[in-house]
Image (tube, grey):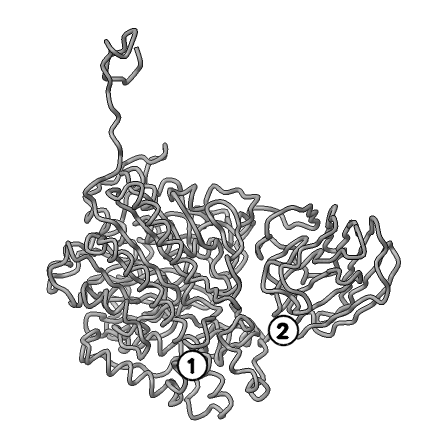
Amino acid sequence: MVSGFGGEIRTTYENSTPEWQQDNYAQGKPNVLLILLDDTGFANLGCYGSNIDTPNMDALAKNGLRYNNFHVTPLCSPTRASILTGRNHHAVGISTISGFGDSGYPNQRGCVSRHSANLAEMLGEEGFATFALGKWHLNPSANFSAGGPHNEWPLQRGFDRFYGFLPGGTPQFYPELTYDNHPVNPPKSPQDGYHVTNDLVDHAIEFINDLNYSNSERPFFMYFAPGAMHAPHQVPGNYVEKYKGFYDEGWDIVRERYFKRQIEMGIIPENTVLPPRNPGVKPWSSLTKNQQKFVCRLQETWAGFLNHTDDQIGRLIDHLDLLQKLDDTVVVLTADNGTSQAGGPYGVMSVGTAPGRGATNDGVTIAEKRGRPLPEEDFDLVQERLDEIGTYKTNSDIPWGWAQVGNTPLRWYKQDTHGGGVRVPMIVHYPSGIEETGGIRNQFHYVNDITPTILELLGVIPKENYNGFEQMPITGTSLVYSLHDANCSSEKPIQYFEMMGKRGLWLDGWKAVTRHQSGDAYNEDQWELYHLDEDFSESRNLASEEPSRLREMIDLWWLEAGRNGVLPLDDRVGQRGRRLEKPRTSYRFIPPMAHVPRVRSPSLADGNWLLKADVEISSAETEGVIFAQGSFLNGISLYVQNGFLAFVYTVMDTPNTWISKDLLPLGRVTLDLLFQKQNPNSGVFLLKVQNKEIASIVISDTTHMASMRGADVGRDLDAPVTDLYIAPFNFTGIIHSVLIKLEL
């Protein structure tokens, strides 16, 4: 007798009775396509007021519904944790960026609690095929490498297939890609037309096709999260040129035009007030002509990038239509937070973004507030290179002025709990389930409401236990009721906000909010009060007129903080206690091996270090890269070419190259590359062959070592450090080992 078997087993099949197992394929259920854009503010889509061509997203809105009162957390990882689980982000262990790792407290473990199943885990048990494409950003950075652990990667969290990238951002032309559980190289180069968003859509279509030919009746859940519009802003040049001159009038006039268009569209109320410029945003007329040209090119690139993203989303939508699956697919499109402030007051070309470029309440950068202002571009010198912005040769981000335009008519930015950080576009497209099309919904909703909405539309009741873990309650509120009634009141009872000490609370159409600054005393924060139902843009602070209401809402915030595991408050941007592993001082690489992602590469910026390579020069024709880290923007490469040892250190796409005068000896050879810091900004590279010093190279600027991303042994898989070889330039000899010792 077989336990659980409902048939009958006798000696042969002729006199036995079979029991057929039922396929768990959820036949008859609609598909789900969840599209999550990055760093895309309320006004950025054409159907929300911008002058950027987004015809495919606009078509979803025209044939579906737009929400103008939809909110998210003000940061990437927390929104992703909440949208996939239906719970508040602190409650599931993601208070801020997952890459920061474990803070030692339940609200920041760097990964989503197993007691909070995500949509893939829930729908997978209902028979759905589950696909994730693009940005993951839901596991600690210590776990990004091929060596794992993989327990918080997409395939270990319910997804059948994954193609994308694990960290918060990646270059668009040279991304660090992961396919299922292993790193892969882009299928072609940018010179051959490669862009990561195209690649993601290619694989999304492939996943759907693979499912369609094997079981066309089985529904799928696809989580599509491209890197757009996160920096770096990189896109094929024709998309940038399309917007040349669009922004020459400046951010003041463009913002006013977006605002006017929003009112005409009905996406914001007629009584909405356009707030003044955020502190630190310069009047357009105060910028020099060269500054204006520079920041316009940055915004042209941003617009082209979004236009290109829309085209790729259109390819995916068109394919669903071709397969006659679009009408029976629930499509939800939104963004993880508002437009970013990380570009600083003037934006950056290749200097690089950093938390220090964020805005303080006083309108200066965080770095300036701390007495360590970050360098800005040379606006006169950079004019000769404006055409490079948007290419793989730059790492650009927009300034505060254009970020505020993207958030029109809202105040502040990504990372802030004011409207500019948390109020974003949200479109629902479901022809089989929405009678009214082209409508606008103004009910307040939050990112944790997406999961219960999808579950209700699918008729799925979440289980109390997934994979052996008892589940915490889903706290989001389904918005299905609003699909059929534009005038009904919001059913959301209450919602708190918190991000690195910045806090807020929504209740019955009112919002209390404070913009906390790191290092300030929490009890000295100035709380503001807005009647959102009457004041869309948070322009009229009623704190002094309604002190009792404000006090009540602050008290409720503390109550919600306790209920959702927000405490202890932590306003640090970076390190939050112990990482998942101790800092390493030694690395031993033995090929063959996968590309080492940036967050797992040796940290070469902090002090003296030694690279020792044990290689075998097989013949006079032996060549290739021994070790490379970084890219042509900032990077190092130790390689052999034409029998000669060569070394290059590139800083801000300016190479410092040295080539030996003597041929390397044949046979087994020890090569040493020693870096000695002279002061915080300079240092010396010493090269040795068989313990004999052959070169001393003085470098005046070593500060950019910190931004060198990704490492490779025996090849250069990233955007190549130098154009003196054609990547990947595989080493044709034998590399026995590469040893790197830090903190000498």
Amino acid type at mark 2: Asp
Q: Position of residue 493 (x, y in %)?
A: 21, 55
- Quarter of the image that includes the N terminus: top left
Q: Residue drawn at (64%, 69%), measured in percent from left and top?
A: 704
Rate crowding at label 2 as few (under 14), some (14 to 19) or many (20 or more) other CA atoms within 10 Å.
Answer: some
Residue 654, position as x, y percentages in the image: 66, 75
Q: Which residue carries the number 1 mark?
A: 241
Above or below, comparing residue 246 to residue 322 in the picture: below
Question: Is tag 2's residue or tag 1's residue first in the polypeptide sequence?
Answer: 1
Lateral position of residue 134 relative to residue 313, left or right: right
Q: Is 131 on the left or on the right of 346, as rendered?
A: left
For badge 1, the amino acid type reads Glu
Q: CA distance from mark 2 to mark 1?
A: 23 Å
For the image, the number of numbered tags is: 2
Q: Residue furthest right?
A: 692
Give the secondary structure at mark 2: loop
Label 1 element class: helix
Q: Considering the image in quadrants, where does the C terminus appear?
A: bottom right
Estimate the x, y position of residue 575 in percent, counting from the top left: 54, 57
* Residue drawn where x is 37% and y is 85% of the image: 246
Q: Which residue position is annotated with label 2?
A: 653
Of 629 and 70, the residue lying toward us: 629
Q: Is residue 71 left or right of residue 509?
A: right
Check disc 1: other Cα within 10 Å, few if <14, some if 14-19, many if 20+. some
